[in-house]
Image (spheres, helix red, strand yellow):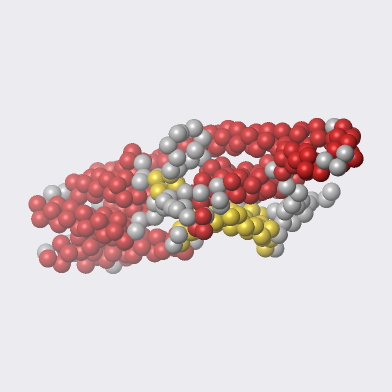
Amino acid sequence: MTLILLSDMLAGGLRAGICMFLISRLLSADMPDKRSVVTAGAGALVIAAGVSLAGLPDFYRMALEAFWIAVCARRLQNADTRMGLFIGIYYEIAVAFWTFLGMAGMGILFRAPAFPEKGTVYGQSAVWLLHIALLSGMFYLLKKQDIAKKGVFRFAAAFSTAGLIAVVTLSEQKVLTISEDSLSTWTILSVVLMMAVMVLNMSLQYESEKELARLKSEQAELLERDYTTLNNAYAVNARLFHDFHNHIGALRQLLSHEKYADAVRYLDELQAPVRELADTVWTGDETADYLINSKTAAAAEYGVRLQAQVEYPRHTNIRSADLCAILGNLLDNALEAAKQAETVEQRMIWLTIRRINQMLVIKVENSFAIAPVSENGELKTTKTEGGLHGWGLKSARTAAEKYDGMVQTCCEGNTFRAVATLSFHGVEV
């Protein structure tokens, strides 16, 4: 009895930790750290011990575990409470279902005279084989970080379908005696699990489409702002060239009368409108070059040093609007954080653009005074005036995903780093 109790407690703790990881992948919540895993596992240990000592059915343990997992996911991973509870409930049902199939398989394999109970050797073997499989699946997903949500859902759909086939097959076997009520119950639950996978997939897809629509709207507004600024700068430049002969005449008049100081002041007045329009060529894309130059000028106004190293491939399929969406948002976020540093010496931004084979890497690093805060798996803006703030990284991610890319962020010491990777191919001019 003591060994069974210990086994239930350890299995409960392991289940809770694995479910926390699953929630982080499906809901894009924070990855569970050591503290959150220990907290969730300890709660599950207590629940398993309490239910076992009270002699209550497993249903109570499953319900309490699902609720506890949802609470931990909300508090420790910033996950949505409703979706966390949904995943927790059906995760517990799936574990119970596959435990039943595992014990039935053990009974058939070893020709047990009766259906194995959880307290028997066969029953415990089935329980721990399942938990080892769950743990292996978690480590596999940790190793394969590039597997998208669609891949996880495909695995879930395949296992739920296999479960339905397995439980239907049980009704045809002659080794074990399984009641019709039990088979009917598990058959219905297997169908419910399949439906739950489909509903969760559609729900998350719907949320993704809504967010994508918002991002496209926000990205269009940000791009319109940058293009408007660029057009205004070019318009000022065009007016200067249009009036060039008048300015030459005025300067000649001043110089002919040896009014050199007035001539210098006149030249300074002419230079002021175009001073912002630097002539440094970074990428060969006029809009992107203007964007980098304008952000460099804006950084200088706040005492922020912006250093750039650019190696940009020419004639690619990367659209100017998408490149500007990534550069503009990453540089805006970096400038907003760097200018809050206490001293001028600490205010730094490093922009690196490199080509690695057919991959473009855009890295923006900056100093900061206040570390960014994560909420629901996303970095939360520190601005308070609302509006479009907080959408910068999402907009950059949307643009990068068009080129099978991604945007990743991290903090190391007093430096925040955002790295965008894009796949590209050359185009004929």
Q: How many marks?
A: 0
Residue drawn at (20%, 64%) of the image? 7
Measured along the vertical axis of the image, is residue 100 above or below residue 214?
below
Residue 38, by quadrant, is: bottom left
Q: Quadrant of the N terminus?
A: bottom left
Residue drawn at (33%, 38%) of the image? 82
Residue 235 visible in the shown view? yes
Q: Nearer the viewer, residue 157 or 186?
A: 157
Residue 34, by quadrant, is: bottom left
Q: Nearer the viewer, residue 118 or 74?
A: 74
Where residue 6 sits: x, y (%)? 17, 64
Measured along the vertical axis of the image, is residue 354 above or below residue 82?
below
Q: Is residue 95 left or right of residue 300?
A: left
Residue drawn at (59%, 46%) of the image? 301
Where residue 113 sits: x, y (%)? 22, 62
Measured along the vertical axis of the image, is residue 135 above or below residue 339?
below
Q: Nearer the viewer, residue 141 or 24?
A: 24
Residue drawn at (77%, 54%) of the image? 314
Where residue 151 sits: x, y (%)? 50, 52
Where residue 131 sits: x, y (%)? 31, 61
Residue 202 visible in the shown view? no
